[in-house]
Protein backbone atom coordinates (compact mmCIF):
# COMPACT_ATOMS: atom_id res chain seq x y z
CA UNK A 1 0.00 0.00 0.00
CA UNK A 2 1.42 3.41 -0.92
CA UNK A 3 1.61 6.09 1.75
CA UNK A 4 -1.20 8.62 1.35
CA UNK A 5 -0.62 12.34 1.80
CA UNK A 6 -2.36 15.63 1.14
CA UNK A 7 -0.17 18.50 0.00
CA UNK A 8 -1.68 21.92 0.61
CA UNK A 9 0.26 24.27 -1.64
CA UNK A 10 -0.35 26.55 -4.57
CA UNK A 11 -0.36 24.75 -7.92
CA UNK A 12 3.10 26.08 -8.75
CA UNK A 13 6.60 24.48 -8.67
CA UNK A 14 8.69 26.65 -6.27
CA UNK A 15 8.44 25.24 -2.71
CA UNK A 16 6.04 22.54 -3.85
CA UNK A 17 8.49 20.61 -6.02
CA UNK A 18 10.77 19.79 -3.07
CA UNK A 19 7.84 17.90 -1.56
CA UNK A 20 6.44 16.53 -4.80
CA UNK A 21 9.85 15.10 -5.75
CA UNK A 22 10.16 13.28 -2.43
CA UNK A 23 6.59 11.95 -2.58
CA UNK A 24 7.02 10.83 -6.18
CA UNK A 25 10.36 9.19 -5.41
CA UNK A 26 8.96 7.11 -2.54
CA UNK A 27 5.92 6.07 -4.57
CA UNK A 28 3.45 7.89 -2.32
CA UNK A 29 0.00 9.00 -3.42
CA UNK A 30 -1.11 12.51 -2.68
CA UNK A 31 -3.79 15.02 -3.53
CA UNK A 32 -3.47 18.76 -4.00
CA UNK A 33 -5.61 21.87 -4.12
CA UNK A 34 -6.29 24.24 -6.99
CA UNK A 35 -5.70 27.97 -6.42
CA UNK A 36 -9.24 28.56 -5.16
CA UNK A 37 -9.16 25.58 -2.82
CA UNK A 38 -5.78 26.61 -1.44
CA UNK A 39 -6.93 30.20 -0.88
CA UNK A 40 -10.04 29.06 0.94
CA UNK A 41 -8.01 26.65 3.09
CA UNK A 42 -5.42 29.29 4.01
CA UNK A 43 -8.05 31.91 4.82
CA UNK A 44 -9.98 29.79 7.30
CA UNK A 45 -10.26 31.14 10.83
CA UNK A 46 -7.53 29.71 13.06
CA UNK A 47 -10.16 27.76 14.99
CA UNK A 48 -11.35 26.17 11.71
CA UNK A 49 -7.93 25.01 10.53
CA UNK A 50 -7.19 21.29 10.87
CA UNK A 51 -3.64 22.33 11.79
CA UNK A 52 -2.34 25.78 12.74
CA UNK A 53 -0.19 27.23 9.96
CA UNK A 54 0.56 30.65 8.47
CA UNK A 55 1.76 29.89 4.96
CA UNK A 56 1.74 26.83 2.69
CA UNK A 57 3.18 24.26 2.11
CA UNK A 58 1.34 22.08 4.60
CA UNK A 59 1.45 18.29 4.47
CA UNK A 60 -0.95 15.77 5.99
CA UNK A 61 0.39 12.25 6.34
CA UNK A 62 -2.90 10.36 6.49
CA UNK A 63 -1.47 7.06 7.79
CA UNK A 64 0.19 8.68 10.80
CA UNK A 65 -2.40 11.48 10.98
CA UNK A 66 0.57 13.85 11.15
CA UNK A 67 0.30 17.45 9.96
CA UNK A 68 3.31 19.68 9.33
CA UNK A 69 4.04 23.08 7.84
CA UNK A 70 7.35 24.89 7.14
CA UNK A 71 9.25 23.42 4.21
CA UNK A 72 12.38 22.42 6.19
CA UNK A 73 10.30 20.56 8.78
CA UNK A 74 8.29 18.79 6.08
CA UNK A 75 11.38 17.75 4.11
CA UNK A 76 13.15 16.44 7.22
CA UNK A 77 10.03 14.53 8.31
CA UNK A 78 9.60 12.87 4.92
CA UNK A 79 13.31 12.14 4.62
CA UNK A 80 13.40 10.44 7.99
CA UNK A 81 10.14 8.57 7.53
CA UNK A 82 11.13 7.19 4.13
CA UNK A 83 14.75 6.32 5.00
CA UNK A 84 16.30 8.93 2.70
CA UNK A 85 18.28 10.81 5.32
CA UNK A 86 22.05 10.23 5.68
CA UNK A 87 23.18 13.32 7.61
CA UNK A 88 20.22 15.27 9.06
CA UNK A 89 22.24 18.31 10.10
CA UNK A 90 23.72 18.75 6.65
CA UNK A 91 20.34 18.09 4.98
CA UNK A 92 18.66 20.68 7.22
CA UNK A 93 21.37 23.15 6.30
CA UNK A 94 20.72 22.48 2.60
CA UNK A 95 16.97 23.00 2.83
CA UNK A 96 17.56 26.18 4.84
CA UNK A 97 19.95 27.36 2.09
CA UNK A 98 17.22 26.58 -0.42
CA UNK A 99 14.70 28.64 1.56
CA UNK A 100 17.15 31.57 1.61
CA UNK A 101 17.71 31.29 -2.14
CA UNK A 102 13.96 31.19 -2.85
CA UNK A 103 13.54 34.29 -0.71
CA UNK A 104 16.35 36.04 -2.58
CA UNK A 105 15.24 35.20 -6.11
CA UNK A 106 11.73 36.45 -5.31
CA UNK A 107 13.05 39.59 -3.57
CA UNK A 108 11.38 38.67 -0.31
CA UNK A 109 8.45 36.73 -1.80
CA UNK A 110 7.60 39.59 -4.13
CA UNK A 111 7.91 42.40 -1.57
CA UNK A 112 9.86 44.26 -4.28
CA UNK A 113 10.10 43.79 -8.05
CA UNK A 114 13.53 43.47 -9.67
CA UNK A 115 15.37 46.40 -11.23
CA UNK A 116 18.44 46.04 -13.44
CA UNK A 117 20.99 47.01 -10.78
CA UNK A 118 19.64 44.71 -8.08
CA UNK A 119 19.21 41.83 -10.55
CA UNK A 120 22.81 42.18 -11.79
CA UNK A 121 24.11 41.90 -8.21
CA UNK A 122 21.87 38.91 -7.51
CA UNK A 123 22.58 37.06 -10.75
CA UNK A 124 26.33 37.69 -10.99
CA UNK A 125 27.28 37.68 -7.33
CA UNK A 126 24.78 36.17 -4.88
CA UNK A 127 23.34 33.43 -7.12
CA UNK A 128 26.76 32.46 -8.46
CA UNK A 129 28.14 32.31 -4.93
CA UNK A 130 25.27 30.06 -3.78
CA UNK A 131 25.99 27.75 -6.72
CA UNK A 132 29.70 27.67 -5.92
CA UNK A 133 29.00 26.96 -2.26
CA UNK A 134 26.83 23.98 -3.15
CA UNK A 135 29.39 22.77 -5.68
CA UNK A 136 32.00 22.75 -2.95
CA UNK A 137 29.62 21.04 -0.51
CA UNK A 138 28.84 18.25 -2.99
CA UNK A 139 32.58 17.55 -3.17
CA UNK A 140 33.46 18.10 0.51
CA UNK A 141 30.55 16.04 1.85
CA UNK A 142 30.55 13.48 -0.95
CA UNK A 143 26.87 14.16 -1.68
CA UNK A 144 26.88 12.57 -5.14
CA UNK A 145 28.05 9.01 -4.94
CA UNK A 146 26.10 8.15 -8.05
CA UNK A 147 24.34 5.39 -6.14
CA UNK A 148 20.71 6.14 -5.78
CA UNK A 149 18.71 9.04 -4.47
CA UNK A 150 19.31 10.61 -1.07
CA UNK A 151 17.58 13.45 0.73
CA UNK A 152 20.51 15.77 -0.08
CA UNK A 153 20.15 14.94 -3.78
CA UNK A 154 16.41 15.49 -3.64
CA UNK A 155 16.82 18.89 -1.98
CA UNK A 156 19.50 19.97 -4.46
CA UNK A 157 17.30 18.81 -7.32
CA UNK A 158 14.21 20.48 -5.86
CA UNK A 159 16.17 23.70 -5.73
CA UNK A 160 18.43 23.76 -8.77
CA UNK A 161 16.70 21.50 -11.28
CA UNK A 162 13.40 23.22 -10.63
CA UNK A 163 15.02 26.63 -11.05
CA UNK A 164 16.82 25.94 -14.32
CA UNK A 165 13.95 23.93 -15.79
CA UNK A 166 11.55 26.81 -15.12
CA UNK A 167 14.09 29.51 -15.98
CA UNK A 168 16.31 27.86 -18.64
CA UNK A 169 18.30 31.06 -19.14
CA UNK A 170 19.95 30.22 -15.79
CA UNK A 171 21.02 26.70 -16.84
CA UNK A 172 24.35 27.80 -18.37
CA UNK A 173 25.14 29.72 -15.18
CA UNK A 174 24.52 26.60 -13.05
CA UNK A 175 26.41 24.29 -15.40
CA UNK A 176 29.33 26.72 -15.55
CA UNK A 177 29.59 27.44 -11.83
CA UNK A 178 28.41 24.16 -10.35
CA UNK A 179 28.71 21.27 -12.83
CA UNK A 180 28.49 18.55 -10.18
CA UNK A 181 25.40 20.12 -8.65
CA UNK A 182 23.80 20.42 -12.09
CA UNK A 183 24.57 16.78 -12.89
CA UNK A 184 23.26 15.51 -9.54
CA UNK A 185 20.12 17.68 -9.74
CA UNK A 186 19.41 16.46 -13.27
CA UNK A 187 20.11 12.82 -12.43
CA UNK A 188 17.61 12.88 -9.56
CA UNK A 189 15.04 14.66 -11.73
CA UNK A 190 15.49 12.04 -14.46
CA UNK A 191 14.68 9.07 -12.22
CA UNK A 192 11.48 7.55 -13.65
CA UNK A 193 8.93 8.42 -10.95
CA UNK A 194 10.17 11.99 -10.55
CA UNK A 195 10.49 12.48 -14.30
CA UNK A 196 6.88 11.37 -14.76
CA UNK A 197 5.70 13.81 -12.09
CA UNK A 198 7.75 16.70 -13.51
CA UNK A 199 6.51 16.08 -17.05
CA UNK A 200 2.98 16.86 -15.92
CA UNK A 201 4.16 20.40 -15.10
CA UNK A 202 5.86 21.19 -18.37
CA UNK A 203 3.02 22.46 -20.46
CA UNK A 204 1.62 25.65 -19.17
CA UNK A 205 0.60 27.83 -16.33
CA UNK A 206 3.03 29.37 -13.94
CA UNK A 207 6.57 28.29 -14.54
CA UNK A 208 8.22 28.88 -11.19
CA UNK A 209 7.00 31.10 -8.36
CA UNK A 210 3.94 32.69 -10.03
CA UNK A 211 2.59 36.19 -9.79
CA UNK A 212 4.13 39.55 -10.54
CA UNK A 213 7.50 38.51 -9.15
CA UNK A 214 7.71 35.63 -11.65
CA UNK A 215 7.02 38.14 -14.42
CA UNK A 216 9.70 40.43 -12.99
CA UNK A 217 12.28 37.59 -13.02
CA UNK A 218 11.29 36.68 -16.60
CA UNK A 219 11.62 40.33 -17.66
CA UNK A 220 15.15 40.47 -16.22
CA UNK A 221 16.14 37.24 -17.97
CA UNK A 222 14.80 38.48 -21.29
CA UNK A 223 16.69 41.74 -20.92
CA UNK A 224 19.86 39.76 -20.07
CA UNK A 225 19.42 37.83 -23.32
CA UNK A 226 19.07 41.03 -25.32
CA UNK A 227 22.35 42.20 -23.77
N1 LIG B 1 8.79 29.64 5.98
C1 LIG B 1 7.75 29.06 5.16
C2 LIG B 1 7.45 30.05 4.04
C3 LIG B 1 6.18 29.69 3.34
C4 LIG B 1 5.78 30.70 2.30
O1 LIG B 1 6.35 31.80 2.21
N2 LIG B 1 4.79 30.33 1.49
C5 LIG B 1 4.34 31.20 0.41
C6 LIG B 1 4.24 30.41 -0.86
S1 LIG B 1 5.83 29.79 -1.37
C7 LIG B 1 2.96 31.70 0.75
O2 LIG B 1 1.97 31.21 0.25
N3 LIG B 1 2.90 32.73 1.58
C8 LIG B 1 1.65 33.32 1.95
C9 LIG B 1 1.72 33.99 3.30
O3 LIG B 1 2.82 34.14 3.85
O4 LIG B 1 0.66 34.37 3.78
C10 LIG B 1 8.17 27.69 4.63
O5 LIG B 1 9.39 27.43 4.56
O6 LIG B 1 7.32 26.84 4.33
Image (tube, rainbow, N blue to C red):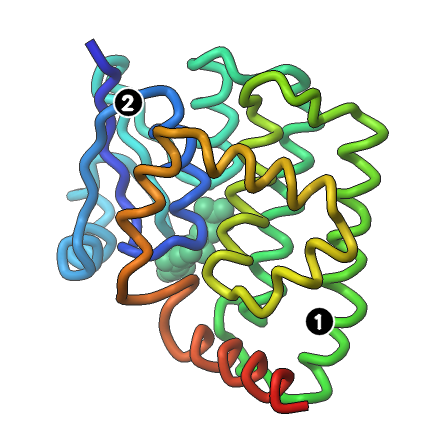
Closer to us: 16 or 186: 186
Residue at point 58%, 61% (across, down): 103
| Image position of 98 with respect to 91: above or below | below
Q: How many marks?
A: 2
Q: Is 156 left, or right, of 62 in this rendering?
A: right
The local secondary structure at tag 2 comes to: loop
Asked whether, in this view, residue 40 is left or right of residue 11, the answer is left
In the figure, residue 95 lies in which quadrant? top right
User: Residue 30's spot in the image, x, y percent?
Assistant: 22, 31
Q: Residues within 10 Å of mark 1 (few under 14, many from 20)?
A: some
Q: Residue at x 35, y 29 (%)?
A: 193
Q: Residue at x 73, y 40 (%)?
A: 180
**Vertical placement of 119 versus 166: above or below?**
below
**Pointer 1: what residue?**
123
- Give x and y (percent) for residue 173: 70, 62
Say left or right for 67 vs 151: left
- In the rendered image, which residue does mark 2 sit on? 28
Disc 1 element: helix
Q: Is residue 131 left or right of residue 101?
A: right
Residue at 43 percent across and 23 percent down: it is 78
How far apart are the alpha carbons under marks 1 and 2? 36 Å
Q: Camera-side residue: 70 or 218?
A: 218
The residue lying toward the viewer, choosing from 48 and 56, is 56
Residue 14, given in percent of the width and then of the height, sits at 44, 54
Vertical relation: 80 (above or below) 107: above
Ligand 1: image quarter: bottom left
Asked if disc 1 and disc 2 are in contact, CB closer than 8 Å, the reply is no
| Placement of the C terminus among the 4 image quadrants | bottom right
Q: Residue 48's x, y, as percent?
A: 15, 43
First in sequence: mark 1 vs mark 2: 2
Amino acid sequence: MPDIYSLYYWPIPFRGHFIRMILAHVGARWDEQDFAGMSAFKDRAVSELPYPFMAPPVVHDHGADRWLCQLPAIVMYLGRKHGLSRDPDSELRLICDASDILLEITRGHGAQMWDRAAWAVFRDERLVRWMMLHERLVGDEDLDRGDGVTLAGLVLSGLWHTMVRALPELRPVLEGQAPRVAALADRVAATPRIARMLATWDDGGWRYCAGEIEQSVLDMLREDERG
